[in-house]
Image (spheres, rainbow, N blue to C red):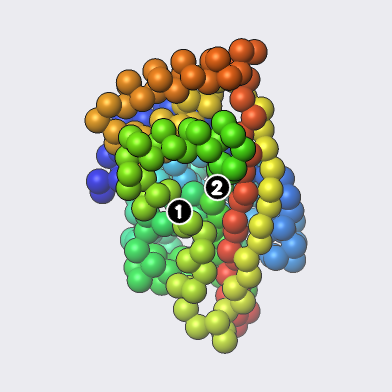
Amino acid sequence: MAERSKFDTVAANYAAGRPDYPAELYDTLANVLGKPLAGLDVVDLGAGTGIASRQLAERGARVTALELSGPMIAQLAATSPGVRPVRGSATAIPLRDDCADLVTSAQAWHWMDPALAVPEFRRILRPGGVFAAWWNHTHRDSTWEHEQELRIEAADPNWRAVSGPYGKRDNEFGDHDTLKVTTHEFAWERTISLDTHLDNLVSKSYVAALSNRDEFLATERAILSEQFPDGYVTERFGTHMVTVVLPSA
């Protein structure tokens, strides 16, 4: 609940700045499922402002987006035509048994208690259904990225505790003798305006929670404006996905 309140204050920044996910990820999901996403019933857990929900719907899936935060789901509902928004928790999903072919959780699974959430996604999945969780991780090994990393470290020495690596929790889904658990990795980048980059930065829980958040962002704007005088920044990501295939019967 505490983390939800952090995102409540930056829901508009989250909607404006957070990156989407690479097309290759959705192609991989279709391969794991053994069929196209079009026409499938999908439940997106911790859907936030609807980034993954919209991408799934654009591929023809029938998407129910579950989100706990009121401000976040308001952003989702306003920008995600064709997606069904439902306010609720992944640890007590307000949906019937066997209602989904695919359950997803994009950039959100680490906020959930697996002891409660795993039985819930298994309950709503049909036999042979698939659960998939994935995370974007920002690359920080170029000069400007590393320098920004050091400034974040100075502002919050404990920021790494809530920044990852979330996607390495691949052993918490139950008996691997009955479940097929597979990991997948994707690398990609995007070029965006400085304003969008700063929206993405402040949407991170560890930046959103800074007591001197406005001062930190003003400093970032000043430094990056000098480094990128054309006003555009290239962000680089690795996306880690884990897929869990349930038994067919």
Q: Which of marks 1 and 2 is nearer the N terminus?
A: 2
Q: Which mark is residue 164?
A: 1
The residue carrying pointer 1 sits among few (fewer than 14), some (14 to 19) or many (20 or more) residues within 10 Å by Cα, namely: few
Displayed quadrant of residue 235: top right
Mark carried by residue 113: none
Q: Which of 30 and 194 is in front in this view?
A: 194
The relative height of residue 42 versus residue 124 in the rendered view (above or below) is: above
Q: Is residue 208 visible?
A: yes
Q: Mark 2 points at which residue?
A: 137
Tell me the residue at 37%/30% (across/down). 10
Q: Where is residue 87 in the image (x, y as percent from the top left)?
A: 36, 45
The local secondary structure at tag 1 comes to loop
Callout 1, which amino acid? Gly
Cβ–Cβ below 8 Å for labels 1 and 2? yes
- Residue 172 sits in quarter: bottom left
Type of residue at label 2?
A: His
